[in-house]
């Protein structure tokens, strides 16, 4: 449905783990990562780790092969394809990076399902090294949100998506937001009445919501695994679609003049007296 926008986090939402940790662990760099973690922001650390892996002779192809092995629940991809086929506008807002996300989505065959990916830039430089940069350059200025990490405020991204869709002059969109982490809390606060929030149960986003659920204006539907992810998402899309269709039919009936809306009288043949 063109009136439904589904916004996904990526790590631990579409895939079942953190892609940064997955690459670092699978390529044997966990100890160095843990040693450097207290000394710099996460996004800067991932750029440094890619430099270290390159220096050790690890190639982009090796990184890509690790990403292609990232575990994902078997119900998630069919659900994404179904939502796209119905006509939903699917988008990603993630604190991972573009190279990791696109490598996995292309491998799964669902990159074309998403109209937009908002994440940290990630690209291969002329030396064959993967570079990872912040989507917001916090070295130059702060994004001003104390709920989010310095390199990305997902709430600001959500507000931009909402305002861009409103500026198109079309009817108000219904949003469904799926996420798990603390960075997904800020965009959850940007959702309004009539929107839907799908936090992963017993993950940081769920814990933050549980502290004061009244701060969330959207309708909350928690999920625990890929099966619930798929069932709840498609059920919500179906519910919204049926409500939109009912509203459309109601408006069509109201637009018809009263004399046209009434059924035509049935003409019975005149009775002939014996």
Image (cartoon, rainbow, N blue to C red):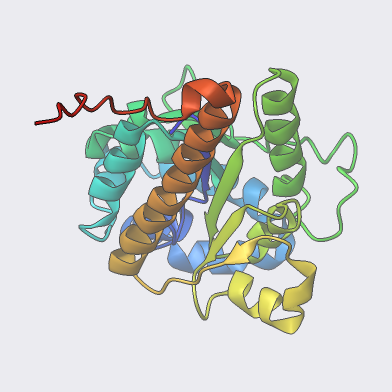
Which quadrant of the figure has residue 235?
Answer: bottom left
Residue 34 in picture, x, y percent from top left: 56, 68
In this view of the protein, which residue sits in the foreground, 104 or 252? 252
Question: Is residue 52 at least partly visible in the picture?
Answer: no
Screen quadrant of the C terminus: top left
Residue 208 in picture, x, y percent from top left: 70, 75
Residue at point 28%, 41% (across, down): 82
Residue occupying the far front of the picture: 274
Residue 16 in picture, x, y percent from top left: 36, 62
In this view of the protein, which residue sits in the foreground, 64 or 178? 178
Is residue 186 placed above or below 52 in the rendered structure? Answer: below
Residue at point 66%, 34% (across, down): 172
On screen, residue 114 versus residue 106, left or right, reads: right
Question: Is residue 87 at least partly visible in the picture?
Answer: yes
On screen, residue 178 versus residue 75, left or right, reads: right
Residue 44 in picture, x, y percent from top left: 66, 46
In this view of the protein, which residue sits in the foreground, 103 or 255? 255
On screen, residue 125 versus residue 120, left or right, reads: left
Screen quadrant of the N terminus: top left
Counting the numbered discs, the total is: 0
Is residue 205 placed above or below 58 in the rendered structure? Answer: below
Residue occupying the far left of the picture: 274
In this view of the protein, which residue sits in the foreground, 205 or 43? 205
Is residue 139 placed above or below 237 in the rendered structure? Answer: above
Residue at point 62%, 52% (across, down): 195
């Amino acid at each position: 449905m063109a009136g439904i926008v589904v916004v996904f986090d990526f790590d631990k939402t579409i895939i079942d783990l953190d892609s940064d940790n997955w690459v670092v662990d699978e390529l044997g760099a966990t100890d160095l990562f843990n040693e450097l973690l207290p000394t710099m922001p996460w996004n800067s650390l991932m750029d440094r780790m890619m430099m270290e892996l390159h220096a050790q002779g690890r190639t982009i192809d090796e990184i890509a092969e690790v990403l292609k092995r990232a575990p994902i629940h078997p119900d998630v991809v069919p659900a994404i394809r179904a939502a796209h086929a119905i006509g939903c506008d699917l988008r990603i807002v993630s604190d991972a990076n573009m190279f990791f996300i696109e490598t996995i989505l292309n491998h799964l065959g669902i990159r074309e399902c998403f109209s937009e990916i908002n994440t940290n830039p990630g690209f291969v430089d002329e030396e064959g090294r993967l570079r990872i940069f912040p989507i917001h350059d916090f070295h130059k200025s702060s994004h001003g949100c104390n709920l989010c990490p310095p390199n990305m405020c997902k709430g600001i991204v959500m507000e931009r998506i909402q305002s861009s869709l409103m500026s198109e002059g079309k009817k108000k969109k219904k949003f469904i937001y799926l996420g798990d982490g603390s960075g997904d809390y800020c965009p959850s606060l940007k959702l309004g009445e009539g929107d839907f929030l799908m936090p992963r149960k017993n993950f940081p986003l769920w814990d933050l919501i549980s502290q004061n659920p009244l701060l969330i204006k959207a309708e909350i539907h928690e999920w625990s695994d890929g099966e619930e992810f798929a069932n709840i998402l498609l059920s919500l899309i179906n519910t919204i679609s049926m409500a939109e269709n009912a509203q459309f039919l109601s408006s069509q009936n109201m637009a018809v003049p009263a004399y046209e809306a009434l059924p035509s009288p049935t003409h019975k043949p005149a009775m002939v007296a014996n």
